[in-house]
Image (cartoon, rainbow, N blue to C red):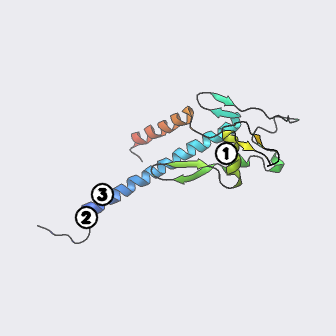
Amino acid sequence: MATYRGENPLSRAIKEDARGVVKQFVGIMKQIGNIAINEAKTNFKRQGFMDRSVKRWKPRKRKDKNPKIRAILVGPADKGGGKLRRSLRRLNVSNKRVTIGSKGGAAEYALVHNYGLKSGRKSAPFIMPKRQFLGPSHTTDKRIVNLIKKKIKKGFK
């Protein structure tokens, strides 16, 4: 009969394997986050939110001289247009969850537009029309399922 002092070699091997599996899941969650971010950024190009079909955004009240130059939610290039779209990133990643969103000043702006919340100065608040660009969708779910199927076929490599 053998007596081991400290950690059992089998236990150590199992822990190392478990760490490897967790690392694999974190990698997959990062890829899922990238899918969600890319889908949201594509929604800016679509000028609407893609679920099973595109739900077009409500147009601006003030018309631009040339609407082809400036899309909804994308300001003029000379004033830093596209900050909201560029601000999208993975905020948190674990082996169970990935959180997508914006940080800093763009975060509040993103919430107002994505959910159609109250905006404007205190003296003249108004409800912003909902122009969703980020959230659960059939299209994104389908792409995520395809990624997971591909990973399973490859054995999580």
Front position among marks 3 and 1: 1
Question: Marks 1 and 2, how far apart in space?
Answer: 51 Å
Work out which residue is located at the far right of the displayed protein and give it: 65
Q: In the rendered view of the protein, which quadrant contains the N terminus?
A: bottom left
- Under mark 2, the amino acid is Pro
Q: Residue at x 56, y 37 (%)?
A: 136
Whole-Å distance between the Cαs marked 3 and 2? Answer: 9 Å
Q: Nearer the viewer, mark 1 or mark 2?
A: 1
Q: Secondary structure at mark 2?
A: helix
Residue at image position (47%, 52%) is: 26
Q: Secondary structure at mark 3?
A: helix
Q: Which residue is mark 3?
A: 14
Residue 9 marker = 2
Residue 64, given in percent of the width and then of the height, sits at 86, 36
Decide if residue 144 is on the left or right side of residue 152. right
Q: Is the residue under label 2 in contact with that under label 1 (CB below 8 Å)?
A: no
Where residue 55 appears, x then y in whole percent?
66, 29
How far across and how far down the image is residue 69, in percent?
A: 82, 38
Graded by Cα atoms within 10 Å as few (under 14), some (14 to 19) or many (20 or more), the crowding at tag 2 reads few
Q: Residue at x 70, y 51 (%)?
A: 106
Q: Earlier in the sequence, mark 1 or mark 2?
A: 2
- Determine crowd level at label 1: few under 14, some 14-19, many 20+ residues with C-alpha closer than 10 A: some
Which mark identifies residue 111? 1
Q: Looking at numbered disc 3 in the image, what kind of residue is underneath it?
A: Ile
Q: Earlier in the sequence, mark 3 or mark 2?
A: 2
Whole-percent x and y of residue 133? 65, 39
**Residue ranking furthest to the front:** 123
Tell whether 6 sits left or right of 135: left
Q: Nearer the viewer, residue 75 or 130?
A: 130
